Amino acid sequence: MRGPLDSARAVVAAARRLYAFDPTAIAELDELDRRLDGPLRIALVGSVKAGKSTLLNGLLGERIAPTDARECTRIVTRYHYGATPSVRGLLTDGTPALLPAQRQPGRLELALQGLSPDEFERLDVSWPAPGIQGVTFIDTPGTISVTEDVSSQTDRFLLPEHGATGADAVVYLLRSLHDSDVRYLQTLHDRTRHGNAAIGAIAVLSRADELGAGRLTAMVSVNEAVERLRDHPALHGVCETIVPVAGLLGTGAMTLRQSDFSVFRSLATRHPDETRQLMISAERFLATPDDELPSERVRADLVDRFGMYGIRLALAAVRGGVDDAGELAEELLRRSGLEELRRVIDVHFVQRQSELKAHSIVLAVHRFVRSRPVPGSDEIVVMADEHMAGAHTFAETRLLGRIAARRLHLSADLADELERLVGGHGGSPECRLGVDGQELSAQELLDLAIHHLQRWRELTVNPLVDHETYRAAKTAERSCETIIVTLMGREHRASVTFG
């Protein structure tokens, strides 16, 4: 069975043969072909001050992306894994520029060497951060900016009139659900949709601690808000799920030092009434004169790296029995929502990267031949249409969103089974069948897959099921068939190898 990348390469190859007479066209098609072998591109998108760079730093595990209003935040910036740190710029006239990058205490400083941000098409940062391996994360300027030129950079990158979109998947950051966010997500979906496929998109309710006013119970109220957003009709079909994240807390947890733990432990020994007064606000925490408190510089560093919510959580955790830096870092990371976001990105994007990359490239070829028709280009359009129509993985991701929003009338057990079968816990046949880590024979796996297929096929012919359940059952049926084909292909390869 031909995979999505092979199918996409076939579409590109057919277009190259058709446009062999045009060197400019061949150069564009060659670039599309190279992207199929490159890393998955995930863009972080949202309005100004939505927390894109802070969240990106959490995903990378280091404070690399600039988080203030400096000039670099106005440029599309790609972050790749590299053994040697480097920063390269590409100017709008196509000229490359090697830029200095200085490691300051706790952060990376980028400098544009006297050039204006408007002169740059993009920046490429290579850094030995483990969170970048196998993926290119892309920080984009705000979609709604004080200047139209800045926000239009993101539009040109994601929604070009011609050529491929600059990303294969999008993490869209919301601070709340504004009309502008809904419009952008809908536009993104409409401009990248073809057949059953569209760009991968998940939403993040970012800066979640601020939405809860930094209280210890902030994430509880935020989780309730997320449940309401998941069921919001304006988001149905345009994003796959929504995850709440306190990005600053996650970044702080991943960079927590032993010295930070010592400061938290010292603060936790103070009388609770004193601490309560001290923690009323960041201003009170920083300005309170007390020789027994950490220095103002140390306190400012804690606020900068953890936020008041993070400091309050750390004190509560230490008082609750956490007694070392590693344990505290794990607790803060868990509370931040960052690990759940990593899991969602892995399930929705990384494990489906072949389909997502193939979609971006085939869509670009489709637009290319439609905009520059020549005799025979209709055949390329048909090939692209057939590729898009067969993209079952996009039906799975849409179904995962409906499951998360609890829009299906299924028992809890059946909903859990459905989520697993369509890849919600992992993409391998073993994960989908719920037997990951178990030693089952090929025949046992095949029998289990057939059992699930029969169960969901029965639902599709049940006249009493509602339309939503019928659609879900049809998707599960197709997923089971794909599992069976994969297992049979695996068995065939084994027999060829050893037979």
Image (cartoon, rainbow, N blue to C red):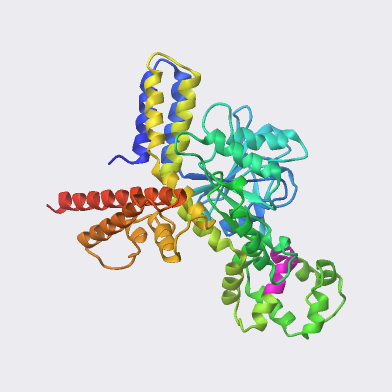
Residue 282: x and y in percent read 80, 67
Residue 190 higher or lower than 337, as above or below: above
Q: Where in the figure is residue 212, as x and y percent of width and height?
A: 72, 64
Q: Is residue 312 magenta?
A: yes
Quarter of the figure with the N terminus: top left
Check residue 255 for magenta coloring: no
- Identify the residue at the far front of this view: 464
Q: How many marks?
A: 0
Residue ranking furthest to the top? 375
Q: What residue do we see at 41% from left, 46% from top?
A: 393
In terms of depth relative to the viewer, which is nearer, 427 or 27? 427
- Asked whether residue 148 appears in the rendered view, the answer is yes
Front-most of 239 and 318? Answer: 239
Does 115 sit above or below residue 201? above
Observer able to see residue 262? no
Image side of residue 111 versus residue 419, left or right: right
Give the residue drawn at x 74%, y 46%.
70
- Image x and y of residue 63, in percent: 64, 57
Along the viewing direction, whichever of 261 and 173 lies nearer the viewer = 173
User: Image height check: is 448 above or below 375?
Assistant: below
Per the rendered image, the range of residues in magenta is: 301-313
Looking at the image, residue 262 lies above or below residue 133: below
Per the picture, the main secondary structure of the magenta-coloured stretch is helix
Is 92 on the left-hand or right-hand side of 343?
Answer: right
Who's the residue at 44% across and 16% down the image?
22
Dividing the picture into quarters, in which one does residue 250 lie?
A: bottom right
Question: How far across and how far down the image is residue 261, in percent?
Answer: 66, 76
* 83 to the left or right of 322: left
Residue in front for this viewpoint, 339 or 204: 204
